[in-house]
Image: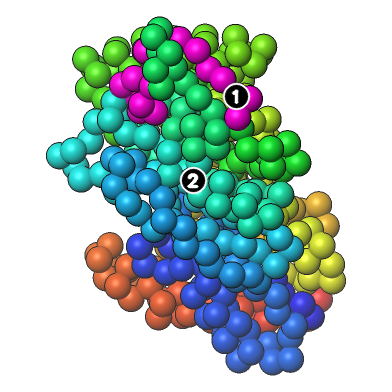
Amino acid sequence: MKFIFAPDSFKGSLTALESCDILERVTARIFPGTETVSVPVADGGEGTVDALLRAMGGERVITRVTGPMFEPEDAAWGLLADGTAVMEMAQASGLPYVPADKKDPRLATSLGTGEMIAAALRQGVRNILIGIGGSATNDGGMGMLAALGARFTDADGNEVRPVGGEMKNVKEADFSGLMPELRDTKITVICDVTNPLLGENGATFIYGPQKGAIPEIRDELEAGMVQYAQVVSAAIGRDISGFPGAGAAGGLGAALGGVLGAQLKSGIDAVLDAVHFDEKLEGVSLAITGEGRIDGQSVNFGKVPVGVAKRCAAKGIPTVAIVGGIGDGAEGLFDLCESTIQTTVSGPMSLEKAMTDAPALYEYAAERLLRAIRIGMNLKH
């Protein structure tokens, strides 16, 4: 037999890599001699770089960049064995870098994200996979584009500071100075939101509040975003504001997809493609996946267990999920393929205990699950 392990992390308690190690250990006890393949995955958020490095091999790279509030930060990204660079925008321009009492998207920049991309390009990378969740910015990707060679100027021809609050002053955008390496580079954006750039469902209104955009700031930012989008769209000859995902990461989606021609893909699909997951399914008898909590949102928005189950369904491979908790709607997984769900919670306990004891609870759940599967295999018809 051959088992494949493709879990997501349990946020704050168990990494995807740790889950794979536990599954390998338990499988060796319950099904000795079984071939196992570990493919820790993520949906583009925290842990994506580490998961892909484990799954594909490669090296971790540290680049000193300009943080969202113009402070120096060390951004970690991965250079995979196949030459792909995998990045998390939050490593360079993430909300955790901004103290709670300092949140103001008018002052924040995505400059560091562009510096991280530029560093990869200078190293010869021509295939980039970047997750854009967890941003602190609402600058329409102006900072990122500026770091890659774009120029944004005001009515007097002076360069505009690449922050959200200065978008209203952008009167001209010049992309002739973009790094020439970009022409030969494929950029895939991990993006699970479909918001446009502008309007009540856009970047500022939907995601601005978590970054500190109170109503007064929000209206100022939205007006600036409208101005910025008009100038950029006129400069490149196509609209950057209306396509699904343009509003992701404070408008970084618009800059990547609209200006740089990047392809926006759902998180789990982009990651599974990057690790050549379909190829790894050859000869597999059982897939084990999971996440911290599975519910209707996991099913509706295609989180890790659902993405894995869909790929396995296409090849007739049963899928089981080990999760920390089960919510309403989780049974939707059963409609995707032959599947079941096992929770790590083995009795009444606090959330704190469930998180603190996560490794031991996960191992016990894996053992219960695999023993049940072994019993099923030995049933007499």
Q: Which residue is mark 2?
A: 115
Q: Is residue 224 above or below residue 89?
A: above
Which residue is found at the position 50% from the left and 41% from the top? 114
Left or right, 356 with respect to 264, comes to left
Which residue is found at the position 68% from the left and 87% from the top? 31
Secondary structure of the residue carrying tag 1 is loop
Quarter of the image where the N terminus is located:
bottom right
Q: Is residue 251 above or below residue 374?
A: above
* Image spot of residue 252 (x, y percent): 50, 31
**Magenta region includes residue 165:** yes
The one of 139 and 332 positioned closer to us in this rendering: 139
Q: Residues within 10 Å of mark 2 (few under 14, many from 20)?
A: many
Q: Residues within 10 Å of mark 1 (few under 14, many from 20)?
A: some
Instruction: Give the extent of the magenta segment.
Output: 160-177
Which residue is found at the position 75% from the left and 83% from the top? 35
Q: In the image, which disc is placed on residue 197? A: none
Q: Is residue 101 visible?
A: yes
Amino acid under disc 2 = Glu
Distance between the Cα atoms at labels 1 and 2?
16 Å
Secondary structure of the residue carrying tag 2 is helix
Left or right, 123 with respect to 212, comes to right
Q: In the image, which disc is placed on residue 175? A: 1
Amino acid under disc 1 = Phe
Which residue is found at the position 54% from the left and 67% from the top? 60
Left or right, 61 with respect to 374, comes to left
Q: Quadrant of residue 209?
A: top left
